[in-house]
Amino acid sequence: MVSTVRMGMPSSRRCDRAQDMPVEGPLVDRYGRVHDDLRLSVTDRCNLRCVYCMPMEGMSFLPRAEVLSFEEILRVAGVARRLGVRAVRITGGEPLVRRGICDLVARIAALGFTDVALTTNGILLAPLAADLAGAGLQRVNVSCDSLRSDRFAAIRRRGTLDVVLDAMTAAESAGLTPLKVNVVLLRGENDDEVTDFAAFARETGRVVRFIEYMPLDAQGAWDRAQLVPGREVLERIGEIWPLEAVADPGSPAPAHRYRFADGKGEVGIIASVTEPFCGTCNRLRLTADGAIRNCLFSDAEHPVRDVLRGGGSDADVELLLRRAVWGKLPGHGINEPGFLRPARSMSMIGG
């Protein structure tokens, strides 16, 4: 039988949070969702300035002293692993700008996770791909928002398309597969490339995932009018190449998968805004400065860095993880009238 503890909460929140929280077993929330996927942000810095993420100038980044050390990251990851977390994804900012990233990957992989992945913009990936694979990284997701050099430059504002395409090849050569290509669609900017990316998926065997534009940009300029709904993407592709849904019962993965009916590849749709998948969400996040977050779109944070640097035990870290999960709401509420966008942007939270 799972033991429980009654959580102490501030009086203003007591009535909706004072419920029995499990202190044994997996990380489960009040709605029965088991959390076994941890996103580890290792930096809030990035070497690009994508229009949907950061302004060209004026970003302020965390002082080095406020960023978790490798030892602190590993300690939280180790506790999470013992609580049943099986998958870890290393994120940023851009994780490959963090010095010593290959060493960190090796130490994370040694903790025994069954899935160790990384999301990158690809700029620094090619020369590191073999070392990352050797360290225990299993696969990568590479962000690429256009297959046209001039448009890539306009959206990313730094870096070049050729470097990213070469990085994909290097990653595959190193065995970091299946390689997924993340595409954030912006209406009027790159949405006319939907079928180009579908053709790219068919030709390369890479899984292209179309991601709806989310209200997580640092500029605060998100506009629903720029969002391209996932259903529209499917319709556009289906007019040329019929698609079949890939049955994946009970999967908590954020992407809905579709294979081409003729067997030539696969695409994914991440419709976080128009078709939320909150009911099966299994993700927990650790920010670069040591805050545990249970949702991309919630401002609720649990400062594990304070516990680590204040002499707290692993049991204290475990309790904080359990509290974070137990406090998770049933959904992100983006489509509700009272929704307030998070104070932190995506690069500060970690994807």
Image (cartoon, rainbow, N blue to C red):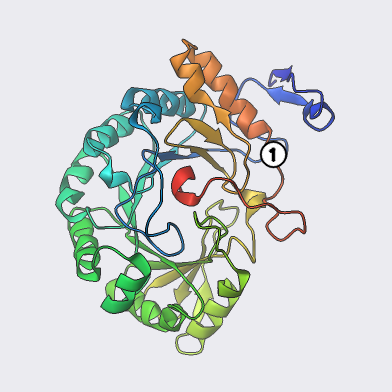
Q: Residue furthest right?
A: 15
Which amino acid does the dot numbered 1 rest on? Gly
Q: Position of residue 30 (x, y in %)?
A: 72, 35
For the point 23% across and 33% down, which residue is it? Answer: 103
Which residue is located at x 34 percent, y 72 percent? 154
In the foreground, 271 or 65: 65
Residue drawn at x 53%, y 14% as measured from the top left: 315
Query: Which SS class for mark 1?
Result: loop
Pinpoint residue 334: horizontal percent, then vertical percent. Answer: 68, 57
Residue 253, compared with residue 41, is above or below; it is below
The residue at which mark 1 appears reads as 32
Seen in the image, is 42 located left or right of residue 171?
Answer: right
Q: Is residue 95 found left or right of 102 in the rendered image? A: right
Q: Residue reaching furthest bottom?
A: 240
Q: Nearer the viewer, residue 122 or 265?
A: 122
Does 253 sit above or below residue 11? below
Q: Are there few (<14), some (14-19), or many (20+) residues within 10 Å of tag 1?
A: few
Q: Is residue 148 visible?
A: no
**Residue drawn at (37%, 60%) of the image:** 56
Rendering quarter of residue 160: bottom left
Q: Is residue 250 shown to the viewer in this render?
A: yes
